[in-house]
Image (cartoon, coloured by chain):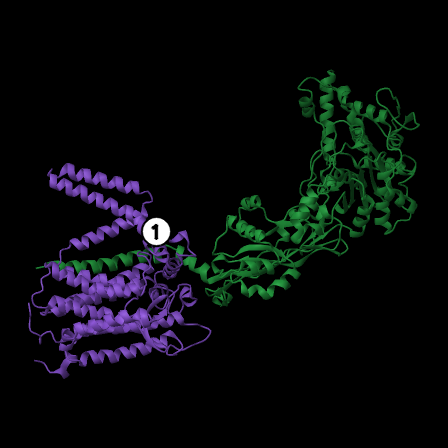
Chain colours: A purple, B green
Amino acid sequence: MRREDNISGTLDWPTIGLYFLLVLMGWLNIYAVVYDEGTHQFIFSLSLNSGRQLIFILASFILISGIVILDLRFYEAFAYVLYGIIIVLLFLVPIIGKEVGGNKAWLGVGSFGVQPSEFAKFITALAVAKYIGSVGFRMDSMRNQMMLFGLIGLPMALILLQKDTGTALVFTSFIFVFFREGMSPFLMIVGLCAAVLFILTLLIPNQLYLHGAILVILILLIAFGKKKVKRILLLTFGAIIIMGVIESVDYVITDVLKPHQQNRIKALINPDADPLGFGWNVTQSKIAIGSGGFAGKGFLRGTQTKFDFVPEQSTDFIFCTIGEEHGWIGSLLVIGLFVTLLLRIIYLAERQKNRFTRVYAYSVVSIFFFHFAINIGMTIGLFPVIGIPLPFFSYGGSSLWGFTILLFILLKLDAHRGQVLQRI
Amino acid sequence: MNEGRKEIFQVVIVLTGLVFLVKLFFIQVVSSHYAEMADSNAILRQVDYPFRGLIYDRNGKLIVYNSPEFKLEVLLKDVRNFDSAKFCSVFSMSRQELRKAFKDMKGRKEFSPYKPTVFLDQLSNADYARVQDYLDEFPGFYVQARTTRAYSTTALANTLGYVSEISKTQLEKDQQRIYRQGDYIGQSGIEAYYEQQLRGVRGVRFKLRNVKGIIKGSFKNGAYDTLSIPGEDLVTGIDLNLQLYGEKLMRGKSGSIVCIEPSSGEILALVSGPSYDPSLLTGKQYSSNFKLISSDTNKPLFNRPLMAQYRPGSIFKIAQAMTALQEGVITPDTRITCDRTIINCHGAHSYEDLRGAIANSCNPYFHNVLRRMLNKGEVNDPYKDTRIGLSEWDKHMASFGFGKPLGIDLPNEKGGQIPSPEMYDRAYNNRPWKFSNIYSIAIGEGENLVVPIQMANFAATIANKGYYITPHIVKVVGTSGKPLPAYLEKHYTTIDSSYFRIAADAMQLVVEAGTGQYRAKLRDIVVCGKTGTVENNPPLHDHSVFIAFAPRVNPRIAVSVYVEDAGQGARAAASIASLMIEKYLLGKTQRQWIEDYVLIGDFGDKDN
């Protein structure tokens, strides 16, 4: 058994190094967004986002200390309790919360507010890890699977009630974790196929072509496969379902999705259709990033960045600043750092002997990856605009603290990996 | 269990990173499209319109200058919270007009929401003063200052021409891409001919601005800014007093007055009647007035001195006489009987020499002269003989500047017509023709056509005793101190200089004792002139024509006057020509009765 005060020696310093690098770069970029040549405001000025972000960063150091000092057993022992508390909070938000930017996702006193949904991520990760790590859990048990989907579905549904679709979608990233822990890939494949079909339906204006293609594939499969009645029936049934999905996409787009969500998808398909309306964010974001060129315009020299052409640039569109001021080289560095961090966490996950920690680690990877992929993907026009932050870069206390806690609980668990009894 | 799933995670993560980097490489490094878009986003390009060159008369009087005008431009992507009701009330326009303005703007080919586009044109000073306080309530709308033409005189409209926005077809023809939609361009007159000199060079200022369109300073401290360069000023040879006087005399008449300084070819006055006030075709009222003026049945936009083609009439006899002398078929002393059987004549005379025949405008004399020229008996076949004679005759006529445009510095000049053998072949469908078919050209009728400026130039050629300098409006371009090089060259005729003295003698006789003695003679100035009465299509009356130069020694002015439908040349045209000479040489007119006669405009029995 190691002594508690020797903990710093066993924390994974490469990960901590990456964390500090990303947070520092994020802070500088937030300053670049708000920088105004005329006013000469200092980066520490509290009237600027950069000054406030520094406060958030300093506060997250206190959180880190707390996480490291807290007893290891707390996280596993209190996982369900924390889960219960956050569910209650999420439930209360629509009732007593305040509305910011169209989303009623904030709980606060006076000018100070937090978004419970940001903290729901790590708490759900703990609960999922505890459930999968518990004795007698079997991934192939239908009941256990239902429980798991319930665990992630409940916070997701409550966040959807806050109209914060982006954050709610983050919870789907737990499916990656389930997959890693043995769930059949069927669900992921079906999900992927549905997404591809969805996009294809939008891209190809005449759905008859799609139907025709499916029929051709069906006939080929029947003609060149085993001619068993059951198989033919199954294939035909599958084809009918697919065609049904295609038909329903149009219905979903026009009748189920809200207008602003429809527009985000339309903007993805054809951002030039209305560059001043729903295409504005993506168009301006691509202009800002694209104008950076190979080496960028230089720190604080971005014209698009400085003059507010991209909306929400400090938060969801912070990557534009990197692309514009630091060019392709800067983008390479940031993407490289994120990929390194993700691979490092997988490495940490795989060296755990404890299933609870490993599941938790994969949750961390999945959540970070989801944010990383969706956020950068949307700024360069590869994904629809989904309002989720880029970890450590986007301005905002709740999101920074949420990601910090998420990562450092893992580091704390990892530091004690030798201490815990193996349960598998 | 779950072997290989870790690797799937790793592969997916690395692949995602790679896809991002490839996509970023395309939009950042490969494509320049986004960089350009960024520039148009953040950098506002403000055009600094140059001052168009000024236009002066020969005595330094300013004729055309610039007056400020404002246009409203819109950068559509910057327009926020547009309150159309308020806009309509501020700019005093109806909802339909506003909708039309938007539609027109979006219909233009070069329209882009990322570029400032002209929205309302030609706001006057007063309009601007009224709306400027409200402009900040309409983000995305900017006022651009530029200038429009203004005139110090009501005269000279067709010579000056007008300036208007460049048309679609002109814009397409502009290969060097000098002009933009909404730019002004000279459309006629010297505004069009000297467009290149007058327009100047536009300047550009680049301003940085934020998403709300608020200017945040100049781009790179103005390193890419250029100042506009004003256009070159033009000094015309026009004597504004003379011009105004000429327009006064022509009021209510159709026709033209051309006055040229023979020694330089500078045009002193160029009157086209009827005319219009050039100020009507500027600023906001341009399009409505243009419609009015261009549909006027009197055709005020038809620049008669250059574009009206008339048969020359009797004044052509002088050209015939000199050609015959040069060809050696007559001498100044050759007398010919006034035999009125083939061709009619007027006045009491029977057997004149050359000077007498010109002074009395004897038709049979010149019929005979032309026959001598065309049928010299070089070959026996009268058809071929006429052909040879006509070709030689053509050469001489062309050397006077007849039959083709002179090349004056104004657009749309017509060339008239001098019949050639080929032309008669076509007219007679290649059937044979000879002198008896074509003799009416002897007295300036038939197939001859001349333009008033050619007749004034002809008078100047006689005054110069054998050469002319192509008539031109502009005597000084910019700071060069000189006109365009083409207007310094002397064009010599094929006629010997000594024969011009005989022509001048005859013309002096016309004024002192012949058809011009009653109205063209001046007390102190020796005027050389020739009347002409040009047949017109009945029931219209003949055109009254007169050419002259004065004084006889060191001539300072050559004139041609055409008054349509006014009868004999000795009346309206001779009066006007002599008044112009008097006005120019003396600065005033002394014969009130002649002036009143012209101004009243009743020229007696027009049919005789």
Q: Chain of mark 1?
A: A
Please indicate whether residue A224 sits to the left or right of residue B249 in the image: left
Q: Quadrant of residue A222?
A: top left
| Camera sees residue B405 | yes
Q: Is residue A50 above or below residue B532?
A: below
Q: Is residue B89 above or below residue B535?
A: below
Q: Which residue is mark 1?
A: A254
Q: Residue A261's spot in the image, x, y percent?
A: 34, 57
- Amino acid type, callout 1: Thr
Q: Which residue does the image show at 56% across and 45% down from the upper left?
A: B168
In this view, the residue in front, B152 or A176, is: A176
Please indicate whether residue A66 sits to the left or right of residue B229 in the image: left
In this view, the residue in front, A109 or A262, is: A109
Q: Is residue A104 above or below residue B68?
A: below
Q: Residue B438's spot in the image, x, y percent?
A: 76, 23
Please indicate whether residue A20 sits to the left or right of residue A230 in the image: right
Label 1: state its secondary structure.
helix
Q: Quadrant of residue A409?
A: bottom left
In this view, the residue in front, A30 or B137, is: B137
Q: Quadrant of residue B262?
A: top right
Q: Residue A328's spot in the image, x, y percent?
A: 32, 61
